[in-house]
Amino acid sequence: MSLPASDLSKQPDNRTTMELGACLPMTAEVKDDHLFIGGVDMVELAHDYGTALYVYDQADLENRMETYRSAFQSRYENSNVAYASKAFLNKAVCRLVARHGLCLDVSGGGELAIARAVDFPMERVVVHGNNKTPQELQEAVEAGVGCIVVDSRTELARISAIAQKLGTTQDVYMRVTPGVEADTHEYIRTGCEDSKFGFTMRDDFAFSCIKDFLNTPHVRLAGLHMHIGSQIFALHSFGEAVDVIVELAARIKREYGYEIDDIDVGGGLGIAYTAEDKPASIDDFAETITTAMKAACAKYDFKQPRILCEPGRSLVAVPGVTLYTVGNLKTLPGIRKYVAVDGGMSDNIRTALYHADYEPVIANKAGQPRTEIVTVAGKHCESGDAVAIDRPIQHPEIGDVLCMFGTGAYCHSMSSNYNGQPRPGIVFVKDGKATLVTRRETYADLMACDID
Ligand code: LLP
């Protein structure tokens, strides 16, 4: 796969770092031409810990957790926020989620194991996955998770058998695909009709399966779940999906006299990857969901349920950046200019996979205007290996420290060891202090599972 042809008419934006607005972590500042985050000089940090390096603005992470919680709870008391850990998970972020009173959405046994390792309260865990293995289900029920989101009748029967054996009853949600087409990349739409996730509403299938949930012993139908997609800017899609799911809940009550307690509206709020992006705020998102919930409950005569939402990207993407060192430059007149860095598709597959856009700056020239258009290429054996295509940047030179903004979500969690590349370390920065929370992998780690 090669890169899309460069748009040679594109002009640099001449912005300096601090003019990148919503793309910047909360504590970003420029002093003596250097980029600082959390009071820490990113150029020094790159030299101290090596590159490529993931860096998180801890104050921004914590601020977003609190903003989410209060945005929902101030509008709708009976609500909570479950961080979608697939966006980025290590022990450090899991501890922050626990400390801020949020719930945790895990998608499988591995994420659950990390949550257990830091004693995350299991009653606040929601388990996801369209094909959880019997072993993962067993681990979840044994751990005493708050809820398992059920994707199929096969899975419902499996959970019931496991709970019976363990002498318990497991709370479950039924995941439905509400048939709403969210305005986002087709690969990350999940709520439309053609989806491997959950119970389709088509031909009344989801409703016809409700009796199975109600008649299955050792499970309790605690709620309904939906997730319409990711990186969504058009909030009306959420409102439409809430109406569909409340109508289903009201129908369950009418026909079976059974009232579900919770509606989990999924995640999906988009963020600013580029200075041109204009995403909705966390408050706008909460306002849309809670207003739609109250309106739908009034319309269908249904008591207002507990709301759970599951943001991933909008909590962790912007607080996270990746630092690289520029190792080589290559100008192909009339084609493009490459800036080669010491990472790439192994630490950020999103550009190769979705042609995602990012904002790069040179951390040691952060106060200068971005006067050139470049493609930031990785170091992997793949022509399509780039982390930013045709983006403005300050004049690059070999040895510069390049900072890519907005890489806090789905970069570390989708990383790989392609070309034998050890995964970067992760550093949290706050109040002038840097804390290494995940060390860089070593060559020995690459062979740790091999048997001689
Ligand atoms: N809940 C469920 C059930 C999900 O499937 C997801 C994401 C979320 C919550 C969180 O959605 P968020 O708030 O992060 O949009 N790898 C892709 C994103 C895939 C999202 C999958 N599901 C990317 O890099 O853009």
Image (cartoon, grey):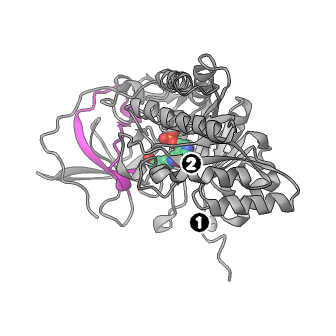
Residue 410 visible in rendering: no
Residue 374, percent across and down? 25, 44
Q: What element carries label 2?
A: helix
Residue 412, percent across and down? 53, 50
Tag on residue 443?
A: 1
Residue plotted at (54% across, 47% down): 176
Q: Is mark 1 on a helix, strand or loop?
A: helix
Residue plotted at (70% across, 65% down): 134
Residue 43, percent across and down? 48, 36
Q: Which residue lies furthest to the right in this view?
A: 167
Mark 2 or mark 1, which is nearer to you?
2
Q: In which quarter of the image is the N terminus?
A: bottom left
Q: Quadrant of the C terminus?
A: bottom right
Tag on residue 207?
A: 2
Compared across the picture, whether 91 is left or right of 267 comes to right
Looking at the image, residue 264 lies above or below residue 117: above
Looking at the image, residue 374 lies above or below residue 302: below
Asked if residue 401 lies in the magenta stretch, the reply is no
For mark 2, does the 10 Å Cα neighbourhood hold few (<14), some (14 to 19), or many (20 or more) residues? some
The span shown in magenta is 350-378
Q: 329 or 187: nearer the eye?
A: 187
Q: 69 or 315: nearer the eye?
A: 69
Q: 254 or 354: nearer the eye?
A: 254
Residue plotted at (39% across, 63% down): 380
Q: 104 or 144: nearer the eye?
A: 144
